[in-house]
Amino acid sequence: MAVSVDEAVSAGPVRDQTRPTRRLGGRGRSVLEIALLTVLAVVMLFPVLWMIETSIKENRDVYAVPAEFFGFTVTMEHFKDVFVAPGGGRSALSVAFLNSAVVAGVSTVLATVLGVPAAWAYSRFAVKARKDQLFFILSTRFMPPVVVVIPIFLMYRQVGLIDSKLGLILIYTAYNLPFTIWMMKGFVDEVPAEYEDAAMLDGYTRLQAFRRHTLPLLVPGIAATAVFALIFSWNEFVFAIFLTSSDSVRTAPPAIAGLIGGTTTDWGLVAAASVVFALPVLVFAYLVRKHLIAGVTLGAVRR
């Protein structure tokens, strides 16, 4: 029986004759990503840059047509007007900034002090109908402030909390507390309960075990929660404008909004006030940035 040459030579694995599709190289892909991210950053940061530029322009340059991006005269008079009144003394804006710092700071501290133990209790103890209670707590944040501001205004009028810092502190704390409890409960769940059990075996009470062993591990989560609570209290506008009326109590958001209107608007002053208003939260977030990143990413990886 004759065997042909083609049959005698064993055929190897058949190679794919199609040419591989050329992909964008690593260097080219990096250049493209950097270019796209640069364009996105410019688009997102342009309003902020425009606000900063307007705050340091003279009024004639602010209203110039076409707009002047470069070559304008730099002035700091608008920032001076934010803190100093035209006739001397403290301006209404400086008082509003101080009110915002007091109201936002105190409400954030109260929400954190009350929310962290509550989150720890919901995480560690077998509370009856725990899921239903947590859902009820979170449901208080479902409605926007504009929906409940009228009933709150009527209640505040009855108890004498209209146009007072205490009234704003209480309502901001009440609005931040559900968010604080829910966010901190996730952080507490990530801390093993065995730490507290071991501490109680050494003679600590449950509260001492929480304070000495669990609480230090919750610092990143507390920092992240405090930043979000501070942002809400600092930027809140609806309650601030409905529940306050005098310059001695009004916070910064309605005070800055009051600069816009009438026949003319000093946009340089508005921009300078907005820059000053944005700085405290940015500085606070920068100071706790390490804890903030750790807190936001806590629980992202399952063990």
Image (cartoon, rainbow, N blue to C red):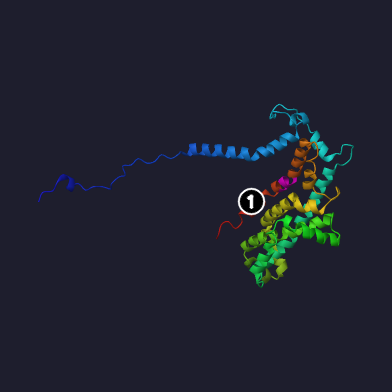
Depth order, front residue of 210/151: 151
Question: Residue 281 magenta-drawn?
Answer: yes
Residue bearing mark 1: 293
> Horizontal placement of 1 versus 221: left or right?
left
Is residue 211 visible in this depiction of the protein?
no
Residue at 77% of width from left, 35% of height from top? 268
The amino acid marked with disc number 1 is Ile
Place of residue 278 in the rendered image (x, y in percent of width and height, measured from the top left): 73, 44
Q: Quadrant of residue 276?
A: top right
Residue at 82% of width from left, 60% of height from top? 156
Residue at 64% of width from left, 54% of height from top? 295
Q: Quadrant of residue 180?
A: bottom right
Examine the residues drawn in magenta and state their main secondary structure: helix
Place of residue 126 in the rendered image (x, y in percent of width and height, measured from the top left): 65, 72
Secondary-structure class at tag 1: helix
Place of residue 160 in the rendered image (x, y in percent of width and height, measured from the top left): 86, 60
Magenta residues?
Answer: 280-284
Q: Quadrant of the C terminus?
A: bottom right
Residue at 63% of width from left, 61% of height from top? 186
For label 1, the crowd category at 10 Å Cα-Cα, with few meaning under 14, some 14 to 19 and many 20 or more, is some
Place of residue 233 in the rendered image (x, y in percent of width and height, measured from the top left): 75, 52
Kindly give the residue lying farthest to the left in the view shown: 1
Kindly give the residue lying farthest to the bottom in the view shown: 128
Depth order, front residue of 109/238: 238
Is residue 169 visible in this depiction of the protein?
yes
Residue 15 position (above or below residue 64): below
Residue 232 position (above or below residue 210): above
Kindly give the residue lying farthest to the top in the view shown: 71
Number of numbered discs overlaid on the protein picture: 1
Question: Residue 186 magenta-drawn?
Answer: no
